[in-house]
Amino acid sequence: NEELENKSAEMTATLTDLINIQSSIGCGIIVVDRNFRVKRFNSDAQQLFHLTADLQESILSVETRLEIPDFRAKLESVVSRGTELEEQLAAAEQRWLLRLRPYVDDAQAIAGAVISLIDITEQKRLESQLEGARFRDALIDTLTHPIYFQDAAGRYLGCNRAFEEFVGLPRQAIIGRT
């Protein structure tokens, strides 16, 4: 009886760990069985899918803010062949990374799929800014007149090749100096 109580306490602790991990991971997670019925989800997933406590509902019939082309075919591929898929999605002004992975049971059989939704909006915004900065730098470098820019404290933030030649120093020696 004591052994059973210890095992029960161990399982409760493991479940508590799982719930804490799911709620703090920072991305939406949905676990579905082989028939695409929702088995488990976290609160982040509820922001994108209108999930309810009915854990037998098919994920394919759940209303979502995201348009996932060929969602059924993708899930079928994951569940039947163990395929792992990633795809970027858009919803209004947000960008999401959708990951579909097989859910493997303790016998190493595919028992369903794990759907992860990661908000990559900020990453995409930063990539766009970086691309814009690279374009700006390339454009400025093509100009034959010396050009530089400084912050409010007078530190050099950037310059073009013509300015490097004008002062006789490489860009790395200029940037950050006053």
Image (tube, rainbow, N blue to C red):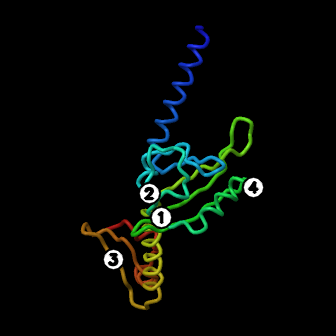
Mark 1–mark 2 distance (CA, rounded to whole Å): 7 Å
> Which callout, 3 or 1, points at the residue further toward the start of the chain?
1
- Where is residue 174 drawn, in percent x and y? 40, 71
Mark 4–mark 2 distance (CA, rounded to whole Å): 26 Å
Determine whether, in the image, residue 136 is placed left or right of residue 115.
left
What's the amino acid at mark 4? Arg
Closer to the camera, 177 or 14? 14
Label number found at residue 152: none
Q: Provide the residue designation for mark 2.
A: 48
Q: Provide the residue designation for mark 1.
A: 66
Residue at image location 45% in from the left, 43% down from the top:
53
Which quadrant of the structure image shows residue 137? bottom left
Secondary element at image label 2: loop
Q: Provide the residue designation for mark 4.
A: 81
Q: Neighbour class for label 4 at 10 Å: few (<14), some, many (≥20)?
A: few
Closer to the camera, 8 or 154? 8
Determine whether, in the image, residue 42 is placed left or right of residue 81.
left
Mark 3 vs mark 4: give the one in front: 4
- Report the label total: 4
